[in-house]
Image: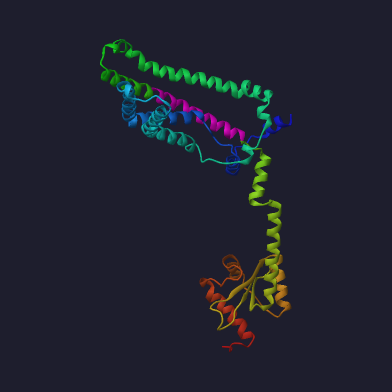
Amino acid sequence: MADDQDKSQQTEDPTQKRLDQARESGDTVKSSEVTAFILLGGGTLAIAMFGQYTANGLAKLLMVFLEQPDTMAVDGAGLAAISRGVLYHMALTLAPFFGVMMLAAVAGHLVQGLPTFNFDKVAPDFSKVSPMAGFKRLFGIDGWMNLVKGLAKMAVVGLAIWTQLWPERTHLEAILTQSTGAVMSDMSHLLFKVLMAALSALAVIAGADYFFQRMRWMSRNRMSKQEIKEEYRQNEGDPAIKAKIRQLRHERSRKRMMAAVPGATVVIMNPTHYAVALKYESGKMAAPICVAKGVDALALRIRALAEENDVAVVENPPLARALHATVEIDEPVPPEHFKAVAQVIGYVMRLQGKLPAH
């Protein structure tokens, strides 16, 4: 009942992280029909490339037994030598053909995904040898699907081959009257027609089966909304914790800002809603630096702190608003406000006796 409930809650498409974890655990999209298609294609290619070479090599090997049987020693040593020679020449003759087939078998798996190795897959699982488990696999949904798929494949491939053989039925009846060379030529031509028909049918079956297997794979890895939330928290962090961290950073930044107000040169106000504290040291700074800014209650705190530390406070609503909107903490005043700020700082420095009065 719990499993059914869990399945019913898995309504969301899997994330890329979930799919990557499935691949690492050995759960990948695998279609045996794709492998069969590529293997048959490799066999067809091997016959086209090495069929004549293989046939000639085997014919020469067998002709020796037909033409010179009286010259062969059949005692123990002679029979062993004949066997070694036959196996050696057969290996040389068949090696190119089987080499292509082996490459096709490997390619049939690689095109569906890189191989993965998981110790859990090779660990002993006694449930797989249980008669009851085997019965369920055989007569379960997967067993019936494989049966239907196998019958459908036989029907489709058989129909494709029949369409190639049926028109040739009259020609096949007269094959016994032809020469050996003509028979070999006709059989080769017919073989390739049958192989191409089978390949065409298997291509459709392989494409459909791969799509079906991928849909099942995606369905197996579907996630619940809670799982997606948990994964998001693992990747991005808990939103509550992140908000708390942002709050702490903001408080620390505000404390550092307020600690810089006593060292400011001037605080420009509007007169209660905006406050911008600027610092300027003649000969050391190219432009005044904003050391603090705030609105409403924070603006009033900046003003009070400035007055407590004898920092000049100048009320200039337009300039205060403009600076608050355009300059950030620890950044210089923008060039478009140089003139207005220079007038304010000049006025303050004259009041403090640092500049001569006009």
Q: Quadrant of residue 85?
A: top left
Q: Quadrant of residue 247?
A: bottom right
Image height of 354 relative to 27, above or below: below
Residue ranking furthest to the bottom: 356
Quadrant, the N terminus: top right
Where residue 287 appears, as percent x and y from the top left, is 55, 77
Where residue 17 appears, as percent x and y from the top left, is 59, 44
Image height of 245 relative to 197, above or below: below
Q: Is residue 301 visible?
A: yes
Q: Nearer the viewer, residue 21 or 349?
A: 21
Where residue 242 appears, as percent x and y from the top left, is 68, 55
Where residue 216 appears, as percent x and y from the top left, is 57, 31
Image height of 124 relative to 179, above or below: below
Region rendered in magenta: 197-220
Q: Is residue 208 magenta?
A: yes
Q: Main secondary structure of the magenta part?
A: helix
